[in-house]
């Protein structure tokens, strides 16, 4: 008999369903943003789970709170909120790559200018050691100018994509409301 993967539970204990949502958000219940502390709590617990581990978001409420009509909309509210957050991270990633493209274009032009200047200016300097320092300095400057676009394309996008993936994972999780 194949072993069934046990689902992890991310348990949230609150006194009222309203404690999960931002009280300053004037939107209707199902469209409200989550409270920052609730979001941080959920995200930090899900981040600790193995990436492929199934999990449920379990909200523990007093029994009188579980009968309120808002309780039935918690799943869709959580799904909407975390999907919207994932889309924001997708937008942030696209914006980062747009900045990276512009930075790279500027960097390549600056590198070409620095390489050209190093080759043109070095022969004009009468002292060979100073000419060598000027040549190497211009080459070095050209590469330093490209630091930021390289950083964007090699490292900066990973955490943003990982965060979007995490929020999509949370959006897809079942939300279970339990009394107690």
Image: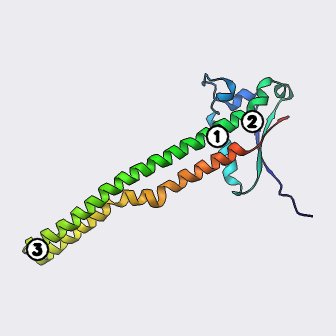
**Residue at (66, 51) in percent of width and height:** 47
Q: Secondary structure at mark 3?
A: helix
Asked if residue 146 lies left or right of residue 155, the reply is left
Q: CA distance from mark 1 to mark 3?
A: 61 Å
Q: Earlier in the sequence, mark 2 or mark 1?
A: 2
Asked if residue 6 lies left or right of residue 116, the reply is right
Badge number at residue 82? 1
- Please determine whether, in this image, residue 33 is positioned above or below residue 87: above
Q: Position of residue 102 (x, y in %)?
A: 35, 51
Q: Which residue is mark 3?
A: 123
Q: Which residue is mark 2?
A: 75
**Residue at (56, 52) in percent of width and height:** 161
Q: CA distance from mark 2 to mark 1?
A: 11 Å
Kindly give the residue lying farthest to the right in the view shown.
1
Q: Earlier in the sequence, mark 1 or mark 3?
A: 1
The residue nearer to you, when weighing 39 against 56, is 56
- Please determine whether, in this image, residue 172 is positioned above or below residue 130: above
Specify the quadrant of the image occupied by residue 31.
top right
Q: CA distance from mark 3 to mark 2?
A: 72 Å
Q: Secondary structure at mark 2?
A: helix
**Residue at (37, 56) in percent of width and height:** 148
Q: Earlier in the sequence, mark 3 or mark 2?
A: 2
**Residue at (62, 23) in percent of width and height:** 27
Badge number at residue 35? none
Q: Quadrant of the C terminus?
A: top right
Q: Position of residue 82 (x, y in %)?
A: 64, 40
């Amino acid at each position: 008999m194949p072993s069934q993967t046990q689902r992890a539970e991310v348990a949230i204990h609150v006194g009222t369903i309203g404690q999960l949502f931002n009280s300053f958000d004037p939107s209707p219940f199902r469209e409200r943003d989550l409270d920052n502390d609730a979001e941080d709590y959920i995200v930090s617990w899900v981040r600790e789970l193995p990436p492929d581990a199934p999990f449920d978001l379990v909200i523990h409420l007093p029994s009188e709170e579980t009968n309120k009509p808002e309780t039935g909309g918690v799943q869709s509210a959580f799904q909407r909120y975390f999907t919207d957050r994932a889309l924001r991270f997708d937008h942030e990633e696209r914006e980062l790559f747009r900045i990276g493209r512009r930075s790279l274009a500027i960097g390549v032009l600056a590198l070409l200018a620095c390489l050209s200047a190093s080759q043109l200016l070095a022969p004009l300097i009468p002292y060979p050691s100073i000419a060598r320092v000027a040549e190497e300095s211009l080459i070095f400057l050209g590469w330093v100018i490209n630091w930021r676009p390289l950083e964007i394309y090699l490292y900066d996008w990973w955490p943003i994509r990982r965060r979007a993936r995490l929020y999509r994972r949370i959006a897809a999780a079942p939300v279970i409301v339990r009394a107690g």
